[in-house]
């Protein structure tokens, strides 16, 4: 898919912007604090209705304004859709996103400095990564995840209020196990879809024979039936009752990321960890393309920084193969076939 003309009104540091990106590689160059990341965020918001950068809607409208509007054209082979979104402050002070639902083939994959957390952060960052990817493969992953969180919160409350009332807990354990296994199944499929691609992409970016492997880690082993989760919870019931917490389930799982068999957190330099994080995002492309029926748009924020010139060249080669790419950089990079735009104080101009 591709994003055609876009128009922004009061989005972050853009009072107004009307911009026509190129169909393939767009390099957004400019000094710090000019609006490069903001522009990527706007493109992501246009396509998905949310920010990849913040969950706090109040940050998005330009300071001092109470609403933001985004309009853009999305293309896919023969289909063309105009998408409009607005973010408005309501009387009670909350913010409302409204507009057209995105077409069901529209996907973006965003990479930013915060993705380093996937490699060196806490397990929650890796669970979020898998869930984000799984949601691009199956849009109904998000409702499943929300339902899972509700059931988990409810079950934890019961464990705190009535730790010894197993009769009261039982139906919630059943529900937890059913939705938990659904979530687990999708995550396992997502990780399986990444496995081949991550090995190929990391090798191609790093230019070495080092092998990156990902593996889903769960206390449930290979089990796929809800009964296995119910049994695991029953085995830990005493400890659950004492701690007032659900101790087994997808909320405790992790993703092992290994490079030549060594945990990536322990391995190598920050540059290498960044490269693994970038490779994980690029490894999403093929499975997401297959699931959506069209290639996703890539939003790559500062993807070249901290990488040496040879690795940068490999990254450029890899992304040339993608469909539409937006790449920000603070130093102008020349890339064959790239459209370079200068971003300066909330305006965008061809270089
Ligand atoms: N809601 C907002 N209204 C107005 N300005 C904002 C808003 N949110 C952020 N900004 C400003 O937008 C500017 C540009 O931010 P952005 O993160 O896009 O910079 P950048 O070009 O990506 O810089 P860097 O190279 O440092 O990453 C910042 O100076 C920031 O203070
Ligand atoms: Mg930035």
Image (cartoon, rainbow, N blue to C red):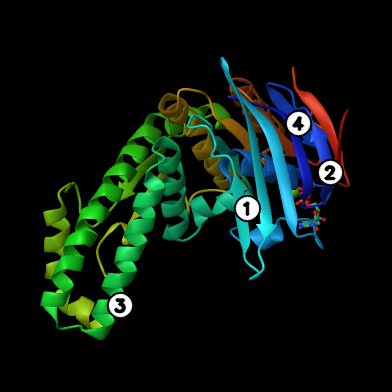
Nearest to N terminus: mark 4 or mark 1? 4
Q: Secondary structure at mark 3?
A: helix
In the picture of the structure, the residue carrying the numbered disc 4 is 27
In the rendered image, the vertical position of residue 162 relative to residue 143, given as above or below: below
Q: Which mark is residue 157?
A: 3
The answer to whether 258 appears left or right of 277 in the picture is left
Task: State the mark number for residue 16.
Answer: 2
Q: Is residue 95 visible?
A: yes
Residue denoted by label 1: 53
Q: Local crowd at mark 2 within 10 Å, few (<14), some, or many (≥20)?
A: some
User: Residue 128, which numbered label?
Assistant: none
* Local secondary structure at mark 2: strand
Q: Is residue 125 left or right of residue 195?
A: right
Q: Secondary structure at mark 1?
A: loop
Q: Is mark 1 within 8 Å of ligand 1?
A: no
Secondary structure under badge 4? strand
Cβ atoms under marks 4 and 2 closer than 8 Å: no
């Amino acid at each position: 898919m591709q994003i055609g003309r876009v128009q922004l009104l009061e989005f972050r540091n853009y009072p107004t912007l009307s911009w026509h990106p190129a169909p393939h590689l767009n390099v957004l160059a400019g000094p710090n604090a000019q609006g490069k990341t903001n522009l990527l965020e706007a493109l992501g918001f246009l396509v998905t209705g949310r920010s990849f950068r913040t969950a706090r809607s109040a940050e998005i409208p330009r300071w001092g304004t109470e609403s933001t509007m985004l309009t853009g054209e999305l293309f896919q082979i023969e289909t063309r859709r105009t998408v409009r979104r607005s973010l408005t402050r309501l009387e009670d002070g909350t913010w409302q996103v409204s507009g057209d639902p995105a077409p069901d083939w529209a996907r973006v994959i965003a990479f930013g400095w915060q993705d380093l957390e996937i490699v060196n952060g806490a397990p929650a960052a890796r669970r979020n990564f898998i869930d984000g990817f799984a949601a691009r493969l199956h849009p109904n992953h998000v409702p499943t995840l929300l339902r899972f969180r509700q059931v988990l919160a409810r079950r934890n409350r019961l464990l705190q209020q009535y730790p010894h009332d197993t009769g009261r807990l039982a139906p919630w354990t059943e529900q937890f196990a059913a939705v938990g296994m659904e979530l687990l199944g999708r995550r396992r499929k997502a990780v399986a879809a990444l496995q081949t691609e991550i090995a190929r992409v990391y090798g191609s970016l790093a230019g070495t024979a080092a092998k990156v492997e990902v593996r889903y880690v769960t206390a449930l082993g290979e089990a796929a039936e809800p009964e296995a989760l119910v049994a695991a919870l029953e085995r830990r019931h005493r400890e659950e009752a004492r701690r007032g917490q659900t101790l087994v389930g997808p909320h405790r799982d992790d993703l092992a990321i290994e490079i030549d068999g060594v945990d990536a957190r322990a391995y190598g330099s920050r540059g290498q960890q960044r490269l693994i994080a970038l490779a994980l995002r690029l490894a999403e492309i093929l499975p997401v393309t297959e699931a959506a029926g069209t290639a996703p748009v890539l939003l790559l924020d500062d993807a070249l920084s901290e990488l040496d010139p040879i690795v940068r060249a490999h990254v450029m080669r890899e992304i040339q193969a993608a469909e539409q790419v937006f790449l920000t950089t603070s130093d102008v990079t020349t890339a064959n076939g790239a459209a370079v735009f200068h971003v300066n104080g909330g305006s965008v101009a061809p270089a």
